[in-house]
């Protein structure tokens, strides 16, 4: 690790991406992708659906942060399901 990395606390290796397994809900794929921030996890994810051979995607990041990745992912899943239900499945129109 170089001098400036030690001085400013920068990590020497890039953050490892976690492979996310989607949850299927009413024809949509929901990806729970909490973002780690200062020891907590910001609620984030994306909703995808293939329409006419094209994959449509809606990504969102909420202001809410929780203490565990599991809690953040579970909250995101519930919010995504609620959004799909409220929009009656028309989230890409």
Image (cartoon, rainbow, N blue to C red):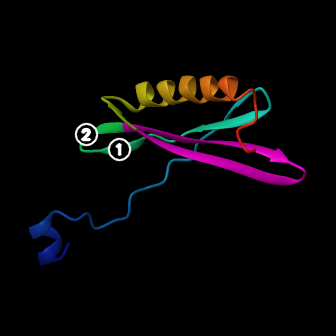
Q: Are marks 2 and 1 in contact (CB under 8 Å)?
A: yes
Magenta segment main secondary structure? strand
Asked whether 57 falls inside the magenta stretch, the response is: yes
What x and y, as percent, mark residue 43?
Answer: 43, 36
What x and y, as percent, mark residue 39?
Answer: 25, 39
Asked whether 85 falls inside the magenta stretch, the response is: no
In the displayed structure, 35 sits above or below 8; it is above
What residue did someone put label 1 on? 36
In the displayed structure, 9 sits above or below 76; it is below
Left or right, 80 with respect to 43, comes to right
What x and y, as percent, mark residue 55?
Answer: 77, 52
Magenta region, residue range? 42-62
What residue did someone put label 2 on? 39
Task: Count neighbours of disc 2 (C-alpha within 10 A) and say few if under 14, some if 14 to 19, many if 20 or more.
Answer: few
Residue lying at 75% horizontally and 36% vertically, measured from the top left: 90
Disc tally is 2
Camera-side residue of 40 and 19: 40
In the displayed structure, 62 sits above or below 75; it is below
Pick out the residue farthest to the bottom: 3
């Amino acid at each position: 690790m170089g001098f400036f990395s030690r001085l400013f606390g920068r990590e020497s290796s890039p953050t490892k991406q976690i492979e996310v397994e989607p949850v299927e809900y009413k024809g949509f794929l929901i990806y729970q992708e909490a973002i780690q921030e200062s020891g907590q996890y910001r609620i984030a994810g994306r909703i995808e659906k293939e329409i006419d051979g094209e994959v449509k995607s809606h990504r969102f990041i909420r202001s809410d942060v929780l203490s565990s990745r599991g809690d953040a992912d579970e909250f995101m899943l519930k919010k995504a399901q609620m959004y799909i239900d409220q929009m009656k499945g028309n989230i890409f129109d």
